[in-house]
Image: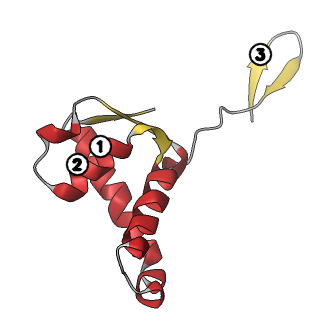
């Protein structure tokens, strides 16, 4: 908490920032402009979903495509981290916007 100096001190809460995984992702280009299938799919999903929601959607797609539940479940944290890194890369290249 920080204080504002007036005739009396008033406690003002610090702004709460969103966790990176809860930030919304918005596409800035058409997905077909990206050659990499994985990155293209992330851009397709970037319609205001959170990083966490995009990672979950991709995770479920991998399961439906035949990934072994035990294997991908074991690596789920790394999988979600890779999705977040890919989204960060796309944002730095101007393909998506975080907000």
Q: Are marks 1 and 2 in contact (CB under 8 Å)?
A: yes
The quarter of the picture where the N terminus appears is top right
* 28 relative to 23, above or below: above
Left or right of 14? Residue 35 is left
Q: Residue 27: which disc?
A: none
Residue at position x 48%, y 82% in the image: 73
Q: Are marks 3 and 2 in contact (CB under 8 Å)?
A: no
Front-lying residue, 43 or 21: 43
Work out how far the residue at label 1 is from the one at label 3, CA to CA, in angstroms. Answer: 47 Å
Q: Mark 1 sits on what residue?
A: 43
Residue at position x 81%, y 11% in the image: 6
Q: Secondary structure at mark 1?
A: helix
Residue at position x 14%, y 44% in the image: 34
Q: How many marks?
A: 3
Most extreme residue toward the top is: 7
Q: Mark 2 sits on what residue?
A: 40
Work out how far the residue at label 1 is from the one at label 2, CA to CA, in angstroms. Answer: 5 Å
Residue at position x 75%, y 19% in the image: 4
Residue 25: percent from left, percent from top: 41, 38
Front-lying residue, 43 or 91: 43
Front-lying residue, 93 or 33: 33
Q: Are marks 1 and 3 in contact (CB under 8 Å)?
A: no
Q: Residue 5: which disc?
A: 3
Q: Secondary structure at mark 3?
A: strand
Work out how far the residue at label 3 is from the one at label 2, CA to CA, in angstroms. Answer: 51 Å
* 2 relative to 10, above or below: below
């Amino acid at each position: 908490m920080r204080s504002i100096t007036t005739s009396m001190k008033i406690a003002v809460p610090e702004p709460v920032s969103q966790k990176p995984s809860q930030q919304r992702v918005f596409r800035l280009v058409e997905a077909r402009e990206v050659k990499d299938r994985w990155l293209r799919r992330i851009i397709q999903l970037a319609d205001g979903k959170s990083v966490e929601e995009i990672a979950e959607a991709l995770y479920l797609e991998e399961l439906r495509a035949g990934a072994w539940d035990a294997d991908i479940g074991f690596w789920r944290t790394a999988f979600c981290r890779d999705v977040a890194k890919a989204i960060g890369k796309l944002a730095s290249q101007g393909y998506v916007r975080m907000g």
